Image: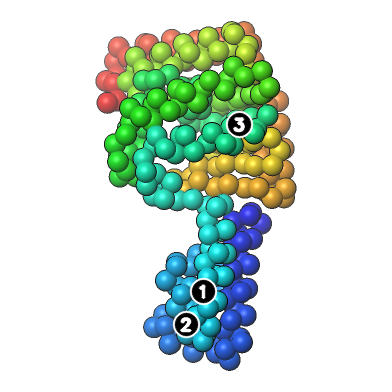
Amino acid sequence: MTDYQTARVSLGVRLRELRSEAGLSGRELAARLDWHPSKVSKLEHGRQTASVEDLRSWARVCGRPQAAEGLLAQLRSLETHYASWRRQLAGGHGPRQRSYSPLDARTRCFRIFEAACVPGILQTQDYAKFMFRRGVRRHHTIDDVDEAVRARMERQDILDLPDKTFRFLLWEPALRIRLGPDTVMVEQLSRLISEIARSRVEIGVIPLAVSMDVVPSHGFWIFDDDRVLVETIGAELCLTEEVAVTPYVRVFEELSRSALRGLSAIRLVESVRRDLCRGAQTLPDRK
């Protein structure tokens, strides 16, 4: 069970305690709140996340309005593990990029796997610009693309810090998916080739054709051995419990065994770049 689900179940247990102490059945509580009975069951069993108003109403109907603050504190704790993009990006993409500074500062070992895009701290300015533009459109946020790109480029300075170790794994589709015009993609692949050749960080590329024991279903970032960030379509998950972090560490090492490095990785990236250049002659750029 993830940190998020554990916290949601814990909140559900507290809600059930309040209802029982009030001498109410689930159906009676639902009737007083004008809810469907299934909502009470889902909240109590951690299958649905309560809203602020849900918690205040629950405490009030149970005759314990003062308990609402405790419930809200549990909800805030839960939300530290599951942050919707709507909330994350309320101030724009730039502030969110800078919000990672404390975590970056205290982390010594970064293990980063991406299956569909180049990681932010290896992106070129133009590639990052198209990524942020896509985020603005998808999440209907304020358009602070230029600020966000500057913040992302500044974040890349950590690659040169001697007290930090970076291990990147990129699945081949992350190189091939056209997330910007072909000229931008070619420049991005050139940047990757340069980084692999410089060897200041470890970059492994996993070929599509290789046989793997694990399915690279989504990207994830491991910060030391105590935190994993996973970006989903609707939110960012922050996993901190050992039982949740350990599987990601294990999967990273398993994926790592399938990766090409050094000259072999450069040859693969160069082949993707050549394919992209050939495709540019027949396929229109994605704007």
User: In the depicted view, which residue is nearer to us: 248 or 10?
Assistant: 10
Q: Are marks 1 and 3 in contact (CB under 8 Å)?
A: no
Say which residue appears at 32% left-offset and 34% top-offset.
Answer: 144
Residue under numbered circle 2: 60
Residue extending farthest front: 66
**How many discs mark residues in the rendered view?**
3
User: Would you identify the image quadrant in which residue 248 lies?
Assistant: top right
**Residue 86, x across and y down, in percent:** 39, 49
First in sequence, mark 3 or 2: give its number: 2
Residue under numbered circle 3: 105
Say which residue appears at 43% left-offset and 19% top-offset.
Answer: 124
- Dot 2 amino acid type: Arg
Q: Quadrant of the C terminus?
A: top left
In the figure, 208 relative to 213: above or below?
Answer: above
Say which residue appears at 57% left-offset and 36% top-offset.
Answer: 102
Q: Quadrant of the N terminus?
A: bottom right
Residue extending farthest bottom: 23
**Residue 67, x across and y down, in percent:** 55, 76
First in sequence, mark 1 or 3: give its number: 1
- Dot 3 amino acid type: Ala
Residue under numbered circle 1: 68
**Residue 251, x across and y down, in percent:** 68, 37
